[in-house]
Image (cartoon, coloured by chain):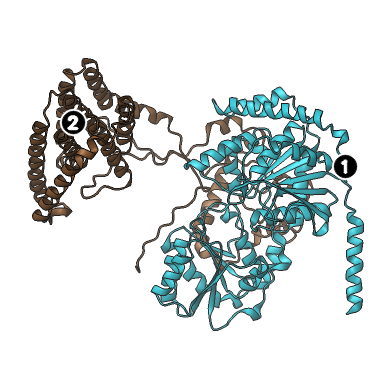
Chain colours: A cyan, B brown
């Protein structure tokens, strides 16, 4: 088995929370268990800067950087080259894997890695339209980065179609590897439910893109139709005020519970209180929330947008168009289904959990990601002129601009190689994974003995 | 307006697509698509339907297998115990799902790829005569700015006396007021409840205030060179032109982009007024500016409500007035104005219709959905 040295780069990593963050962490852990060396590079979060080790010997570089907007760092094009070069050489990186199109670090790392002749992979975690100004800008940037990347990964088939269109890629160059969950952390608990009520759980950031307007419209109608239904809504955001207003207006204080933001470790305890999980997102590449809910044994009601129809089988989820009437109808239908659950073996929560556990696991994700790495690890390195030709094809004006950027970056690489020759850069000591595991194992044994 | 929905792939992809996709037979694609459609229509009732879930969840799919090593653990394959060779021959069609383990590599491109892509679903086909008629709002505004500048130049040169302008603009305002009153009655517009006394009181107060301020306004930019004033005026009139409210038929108030336009025009007028030499001229000019940029656009919108022909007549009239007034100042500008008006009226609509061919708008399942909320309760 060939061992690779991989560097994951993204602006989004712990301590901030989200889909990209957990993907990076879990995928890295599983890749390390498969015998690869993984380091993560992200920007500094407040006082958390420098080099840190996380569980399992996962090394994280928190690089000081200026943050501009929602955790993305300031685009500097070339300023990050020296530090990225040091890290890539120190860690003897072979493959640079960038995550998320909104991440400046990801784009810059891929550009510098290409200037240094390393292999690059890009993972896209979200969908983006073609109409608005930010979409056009990000898409152009993505085209630049992806025109010279060895392979791209998307989290759903819809996301692949989107990325192929946005970045004008060959579809054969894009793999679909879904996200996953740690199913063991999302086990059903039949004792947590309140049998007097049929509880609908909603867990999402309360923002426009998550369809809170639909939720605000649907909740009072459902409460009027079904006397036994109550809502538990977790999450925070600018749209929370709308929900509170709705609750006041319809006097549903005893039937709509607003939890505020829910910590990742408490997600399961909220989910298991419910019978139905409601998701009203307006756009979603791959919805981890509904997978977690299904794993906890909840029936899922979701809007049919983005990659959501690909995620769960039909007996677990009822789809609705992103319209008030459709959501109310689907939810009513599912409320009716809750009572009949005991008569159908395949609708039992435990059965749901078993199925989801088989469908999604991070080990599977890591295995498939590894397959991508192995495929590109020995790809021949094209000459600089071929790289420039690819950038040139990006657009009438943009193509020339991109060529300029790539050429300057290459020259900076030459200057850096003269200033700090790579043989004079100290190689980082490897982390002894085997010993770490042995120590952890011994610790656990001692704990058991103490008990 | 016609809507032309098309359901075609992106050209560069169909050109590039090779190997995998080309090899998959078209019958496959049709079957798959039909399958998907069926699945969609039945999805609302499939919650308790257990027969559909058997093939979807393969019991032995714990690990992903290499395409060659796939042993076929789906329900149908188990039922059909006829050996591996046959399974290899009849590969199950690829499905756009993530929760099943498929016997295809992760980078497989199916024939159904981008099937849901829609191009130019909301393209508007323009009708030339209608677009020509609609250009009237633009030409009217350009002409009105030209007339205003011509009035200033005449005032500046002394060929137009301040009191003449004052009488002229007052008469026009009264005429406009009568016109407005009649039309309000006739069109049943919302602001029929005008309290005339209040209106007149407001007018008088405003005029007195302006009259009192005119000496200050006259000396406002004494220390600034005229060239700066001209340059700034041009900039502000450009802003006025850019932000003018062309599209809404708003008859009662002035909202955000339109208010920027009005402010720019008034600022330009104040700058120009400070170049005049008598207080009466300044007063007359600013009163005229307020009427011309504040009230006149509203009356033009009323005219548009009456009929497109009336609006067009006004546009022609204004263009001619502007051209005639500039004839005495600069023939080049007058001719330029006329040709510009002609271009906007007849050339730009052609141009707009012609560039529609380059419209390339794509929609698909990745677009952010627009939630439809009825607010039955609120």
- Camera-side residue: A404 or B272? B272
Q: Which residue is mark 2?
A: B315
Q: Is residue B216 left or right of residue A400?
A: left
Tag of residue B242? none
Which chain's residue wears label 1?
A
Residue A378 rendering spot, x and y as whole percentages:
81, 35
Instruction: Identify the element where label 1 is drawn.
Output: loop
Mark 1: give few (<14), some (14-19) or many (20+) Cα within 10 Å.
some
Q: Let me know if residue A130 appears in the view.
A: no
- Camera-side residue: B363 or A388? A388
Total labels: the figure holds 2
- Camera-side residue: A257 or B205? B205
Q: Which residue is mark 1?
A: A427
Image height of A164 relative to A406, above or below: below
Residue at image point 52% right, 48% down: B365
Q: Residue furthest bottom?
A: A196
Instruction: Identify the element where label 2 is drawn.
Output: helix
Q: Could you tell me how far apart the alpha carbons at marks 2 and 1 are, in whole angstroms?
A: 77 Å
Which chain's residue wears label 2?
B
Residue A352 rendering spot, x and y as whole percentages:
66, 68
Image height of A303 relative to B323, above or below: below
Residue at image point 60% right, 66% down: B50
């Amino acid at each position: 088995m060939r061992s690779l040295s991989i560097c994951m780069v993204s602006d989004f990593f712990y301590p901030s929370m989200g889909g990209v963050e957990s993907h990076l962490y879990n995928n890295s852990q599983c890749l390390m268990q498969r015998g690869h060396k993984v380091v993560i590079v992200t920007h500094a979060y407040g006082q958390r800067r420098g080099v840190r080790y996380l569980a399992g010997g996962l090394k994280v570089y928190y690089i000081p950087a200026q943050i501009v907007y929602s955790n993305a760092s300031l685009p500097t094009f070339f300023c990050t080259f020296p530090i990225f070069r040091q890290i890539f050489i120190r860690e003897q990186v072979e493959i640079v894997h960038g995550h998320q199109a909104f991440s400046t670090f990801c784009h810059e790392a891929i550009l510098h890695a290409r200037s240094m002749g390393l292999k690059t992979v890009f993972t896209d975690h979200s969908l983006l339209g073609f109409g608005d100004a930010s979409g056009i800008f990000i898409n152009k940037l993505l085209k630049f980065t992806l025109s010279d990347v060895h392979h791209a990964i998307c989290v759903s088939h819809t996301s692949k179609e989107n990325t192929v269109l946005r970045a004008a890629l060959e579809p054969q160059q894009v793999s679909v590897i879904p996200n996953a969950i740690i199913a063991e952390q999302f086990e059903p608990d039949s004792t947590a439910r309140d049998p007097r009520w049929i509880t609908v759980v909603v867990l999402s950031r309360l923002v426009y893109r998550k369809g809170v307007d639909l939720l605000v419209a649907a909740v009072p109608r459902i409460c009027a139709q079904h006397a036994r239904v109550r809502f538990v809504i977790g999450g925070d955001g600018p749209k929370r005020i709308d929900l509170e207003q709705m609750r006041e207006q319809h006097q549903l204080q005893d039937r709509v519970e607003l939890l505020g933001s829910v910590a990742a470790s408490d997600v399961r305890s909220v989910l298991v209180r419910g019978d139905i999980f409601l998701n009203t997102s307006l756009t979603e590449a791959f919805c981890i929330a509904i997978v977690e809910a299904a794993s906890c044994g909840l029936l899922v009601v979701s809007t049919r947008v983005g990659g959501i129809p690909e995620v769960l089988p039909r007996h677990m989820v009822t789809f609705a168009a992103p319209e008030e009437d459709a959501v109310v109808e689907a939810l009513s239908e599912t409320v009716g289904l809750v009572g009949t659950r005991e008569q159908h073996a395949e609708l039992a929560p435990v059965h749901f959990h078993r199925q989801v556990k088989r469908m999604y696991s991070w080990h599977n994700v890591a295995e498939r990601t590894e397959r991508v790495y192995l495929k590109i690890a020995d790809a021949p390195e094209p000459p600089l002129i071929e790289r420039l030709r690819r950038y040139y094809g990006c657009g009438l004006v943009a193509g020339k601009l991109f060529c300029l950027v790539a050429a300057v970056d290459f020259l900076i690489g030459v200057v850096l190689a003269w200033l700090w020759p790579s043989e004079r850069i100290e190689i980082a000591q490897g982390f002894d994974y085997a010993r770490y595991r042995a120590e952890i194992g011994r610790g656990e044994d001692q704990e058991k003995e103490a008990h | 307006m016609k809507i032309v929905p098309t359901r075609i792939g992106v050209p560069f992809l169909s050109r590039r697509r090779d190997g995998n996709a080309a090899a998959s037979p078209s019958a496959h694609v049709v079957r798959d698509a039909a399958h998907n459609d069926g699945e969609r229509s039945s999805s609302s009732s499939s919650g308790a339907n257990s027969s559909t879930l058997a093939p979807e969840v393969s019991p032995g799919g714990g690990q992903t297998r290499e395409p060659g090593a796939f042993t076929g653990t789906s329900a149908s394959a188990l039922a059909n115990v006829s050996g591996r060779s046959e399974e290899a021959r009849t590969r199950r069609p690829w499905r756009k799902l993530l929760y099943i383990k498929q016997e295809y590599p992760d980078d497989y491109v199916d024939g159904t790829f981008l099937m849901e892509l829609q191009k130019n679903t909301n393209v508007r086909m323009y009708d030339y005569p209608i677009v020509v008629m609609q250009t009237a709002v633009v030409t009217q505004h350009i002409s009105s700015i030209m007339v205003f500048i011509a009035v200033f130049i005449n005032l500046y040169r002394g060929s137009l006396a301040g009191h003449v302008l004052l009488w002229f603009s007052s008469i026009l305002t009264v005429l406009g007021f009568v016109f407005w009153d009649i039309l309000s009655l006739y069109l049943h517009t919302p602001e029929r409840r005008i309290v005339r006394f209040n209106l007149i009181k407001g007018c008088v107060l405003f005029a007195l205030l302006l009259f009192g301020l005119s000496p200050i306004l006259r000396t406002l930019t004494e220390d600034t060179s005229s060239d700066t004033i001209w340059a700034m005026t041009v900039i502000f009139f450009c802003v006025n032109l850019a932000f003018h409210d062309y599209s809404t038929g708003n008859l009662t108030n002035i909202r955000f982009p339109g208010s920027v336009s009005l402010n720019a025009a008034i600022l330009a007028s104040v700058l120009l007024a400070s170049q005049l030499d008598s207080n009466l001229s300044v007063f007359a000019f600013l009163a005229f500016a307020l009427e011309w940029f504040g009230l006149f656009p509203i009356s033009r919108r009323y005219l548009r409500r009456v009929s497109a022909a009336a609006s067009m007549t006004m546009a022609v009239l204004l263009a001619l007035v502007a051209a005639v007034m500039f004839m005495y100042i600069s023939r080049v500008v007058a001719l330029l104005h006329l040709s510009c008006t002609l271009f906007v009226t007849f050339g730009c609509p052609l141009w707009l219709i012609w560039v529609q061919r380059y419209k390339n708008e794509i929609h698909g399942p990745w677009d952010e959905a627009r939630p439809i909320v009825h607010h039955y309760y609120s």
